Image (tube, rainbow, N blue to C red):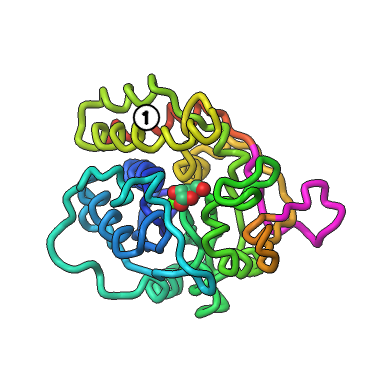
Amino acid sequence: MPDHAIIIDTDPGIDDAVAIFTALASPEIEVLGLTTVGGNVPVAQTTRNGRAIVALAGRHAVPVLQGCGRPLILDPQTAETVHGSDGLADLDLAVPDGPAAAAHAVDWIVETVAGRPAGSVTLCALGPLTNVAAALVRAPDLAERLAGIVLMGGSVFVGGNTTAVAEFNMAVDPHAADIVFRSGAALTMVPLDCTHKALMTNRWIEQIDRLGTPVGHAVAAMLRFYQRFDMERYAFAGGPLHDPNVIAYLLKPDLYAVRRCHVAVEITSPLTRGMTVTDWWGRFAGAPNCGVVHDVDADGFFDLIAQRLADL
Ligand code: RIB
Ligand code: CA
C-alpha cells in the first residue's frame, strides 16, 4: 500500500519532468494522474509533454488531463528560453498516438478527490496554480478533502526569478495563487529559498547519463540544456532543480526544514504582484496557513533522485 496517492498538476517543463519521473519510479507513491496547465510552454504542449513523459517511463496507464490554458486574469507568459521551444529541451520525445483524455483537468481533480476517502489524496502543484484555484472554487469542500497541497513556488528572502520579487509559478497567475493560499487547504510551499540550495553539478548529471537508460539519457540531455540559464543569470555553480523537491519532500521529509508561517500573495501592485509575502516572525499577519520549506539536505536530495531514476 503506497504511502501517498497524488495528483501532479504540472507545466512540463524540464524540472517538472524529473519530478514526474521520480514520482513514477517510487513505490511509496501512487500517481493517480497528471493534470497539465499553461506555464513553461502553452498547455497543449505541456499536455503532449506529460504524455511523452509517462510513456518514456513505461507507465502508459497514468492518465494525463489537459487543464487551463491561461491565467485567471493576466495574459499568459511562458518560459521557452529556459525549457526550450517544446518545453523539454527540444528533444522531440515521442508522444503516444491518439487523443489526450477527454475530461478537463479541473473536473478530473474534483471528481478524483471526491471519489476517494477524505484525506487520502495529495495535490502536488509544480506550475502556475490556475487549475488548483479553479478546482477549489468549483468544489468548496476540496480544500478539506485533500490530504494537502504541496507546491513548488514562491520566494521568501531570495527575491524572484520572474520579477524582482516574484517566482514564475506565482508571477504567471498571482490571482490563482491568492485563492489557493486563502483556501484553508493544508499547504506546504517549496520556494526558491529551498530550491536555490539544490544546485546540480555536471558530475551528478553525468551520473544520471551513465544510468544508460532512455530516461537517464533524456534527463541528462534536458538538464544540460536547462541549467545554463540559471547559471548565467545567477552566476550559480549549477542550476537549481526546483520541482523534484516537491516529490522528494513527500518521500523523505527529513531532508527538509519547514517553518509554519502566514503567507499571502500580492495581487494588486504591478511592481510586486506575485510576491509571496511571508510573516516569518509570526508578528504581523494572522495564524500560519502554510509550511514553508526553507532548507534542504542537497546531497541527500540528489542521491534520492538518482536512486529513483535508476529504477525506470
Ligand atoms: O520558478 C520555477 C518554477 O517555474 C518551476 O516549477 C518551473 O518548472 C516553472 O514552472
Ligand atoms: Ca513547473
Q: Is residue 94 above or below residue 45?
A: above
Residue 3 visible in the picture:
no
Left or right: where 122 falls relative to 218: right
Q: Residue furthest top?
A: 203
Q: Residue furthest right?
A: 283
Q: Is residue 231 above or below residue 279?
A: above
Residue lying at 33% horizontally and 46% vertically, measured from the top left: 84
Task: Give the magenta-colored segment's residue range.
Answer: 277-294
Q: Position of residue 146 (x, y in %)?
A: 53, 65
Q: In the depicted view, which residue is nearer to us: 270 or 158?
A: 270
Q: Position of residue 300 (x, y in %)?
A: 50, 27
Find disc 1 in the rendering and name its residue: 306
In the picture, residue 289 is in which quadrant?
Answer: bottom right
User: From the image, which quarter does the C terminus lie in?
Assistant: top left
In magenta segment, residue 183:
no
Q: Position of residue 271 (x, y in %)?
A: 68, 59
Residue lying at 49% horizontally and 73% vertically, measured from the top left: 135
Left or right: where 312 falls relative to 181: left
Residue lying at 35% horizontally and 62% vertically, measured from the top left: 42
Q: Label 1, secondary structure: give it.
A: helix
In the picture, residue 275 is in which quadrant?
Answer: bottom right
Residue lying at 14% horizontally and 66% vertically, measured from the top left: 98
Left or right: where 243 falls relative to 187: left
Q: Is residue 93 above or below residue 118?
A: above
Q: Position of residue 274 (x, y in %)?
A: 62, 59
In magenta segment, residue 282:
yes
Residue 51 visible in the picture:
yes
Mark 1: give few (<14), some (14-19) or many (20+) Cα within 10 Å.
Answer: some
Q: Which amino acid type is marked by label 1?
A: Ala
